[in-house]
Image (tube, helix red, strand yellow):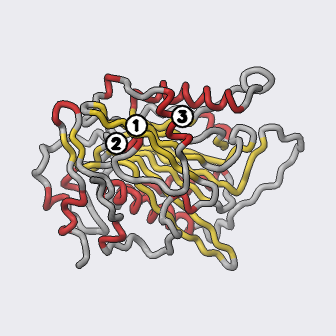
Amino acid sequence: MRPSRRIEEYGIRIGRMPKGPRNTIADVPGVSVGHCTLADGPVQTGVTAVIPAPGNLFREKVMAACHVINGFGKSCGIVQIEEMGTLETPILLTNTFGVGATSEALVRSMLAANPDIGRETGTVNPAVFECNDGFLNDIRALPVREEHVLKAIASAGSDFEEGAVGAGRGMSCYQLKGGIGSASRIVEYGDSSFTLGALVLSNFGQMEDLTVDGRKIGATIFGIAPPEDEQGSIIALLATDAPLTERQLKRVARRASVGITRTGAFIGNGSGEIALAFTTANRVFHDETSPVRQIGMFNENEINLLFRAAVEATEEAVLNSMVRAEAVTGRDGHTRRSLAEFAELFAFK
């Protein structure tokens, strides 16, 4: 049974900024999330879809930027996002060997919605990110198919599950169960209020380093699993409705690394750690005819508010990915236990 309590329900308060009503990435208006989970014996994997905004994303792109914290990864679409500063498809998360099938399915979905792609207009840049779930999942079986991608996209909504679901089904974090986690923060600036939300796919860390709200609990539970080299990964997605340029978005994306390391990570050699940030405030029209467009830009004298929000939301999202995940047994009897089993080490009475 999937644990029902999120980290805040154990009495843990991460940071000091106010949270959104759901405390998820879906607190950013228009952002939705869906999953397709594959859980059948040695197959423990899936697909998670993050829809940045409603409508046709190819025709109305959102501004975006990536930050590669450590580049041991096989993600798709980063180069064009970095060059053009825009995101024009849903963001899909899956396992390392699922990137090809997921990318093709996403392209087919975009072609169906835009008959001019590859004919009267340019091609489309699919955004697909991955982590290696091979400890629990028989990754060599290549189980992810087009129907799983389409199901994840079709199921996207503002209320979604966390933990061992979708792309997070087979992921490990600090040698416990990892997966999908999310959180949000409200940024208040004068008479204006903005939201920043984070969603992570967590698959990194060594148990002895695990830290919850500053408490190094990993050393206490160290020993329930053999020591392993740090060879994991994490994808951190940051969404906001604050008006940011792609340069500012890159600065926000960099701060995800602080939230990750607050949970104990040192970002190892074999860890693929990538952050992507996007804003729903500045839309870029594919069929724009005006030679000049006006866009909003956040006051950088106040951008520390967004930096703090990114750090707090990322840290909390990682912890939610762990406490919301149930224990999973996968290929060859490999098992990852849930952080929720060790709540007495960090919960306030």
SS at badge 1: strand
Q: Position of residue 337 (x, y in %)?
A: 20, 50
Residue 214 horizontal/vertical position (percent): 29, 68
Q: How many marks?
A: 3
For label 3, the SS is helix
Q: Amino acid at mark 1?
A: Gly
The residue lying toward the viewer, choosing from 317 and 233, is: 317
* Residue at x 68% of width, y 64% of height: 298
Mark sitting earlier along the chain (1/2): 1
The reply, left or right, for residue 29 in relation to residue 260 is right
Is 94 placed above or below 322 here? above
Image spot of residue 312 (x, y percent): 44, 65
Residue nearer the viewer, 328 or 260: 328
Alpha-carbon span between mark 2 and mark 3: 17 Å
How packed is label 3: few (under 14 Cα within 10 Å), some, or many (20 or more)? many
Residue drawn 61% across and 49% down? 52
Pointer 3: what residue? Answer: 150
Label 1 sits on residue = 46
Residue 219 occupies quadrant: bottom left
> Which tag, 1 or 3, sits closer to the chain's start?
1
Q: Which is more N-terminal, label 3 or label 2? A: 3
> CB under 8 Å between callouts 1 and 2?
yes
Q: Residue furthest right?
A: 290
Alpha-carbon distance for marks 1 and 2? 6 Å
Q: Position of residue 127 (x, y in %)?
A: 56, 36
Q: Which residue is mark 2?
A: 169
The answer to whether residue 120 is above or below residue 343 is: above
Select label 2 or label 3 by which is in front.
3
> Circle 2 sits in a helix, a strand or a loop, which is it?
loop
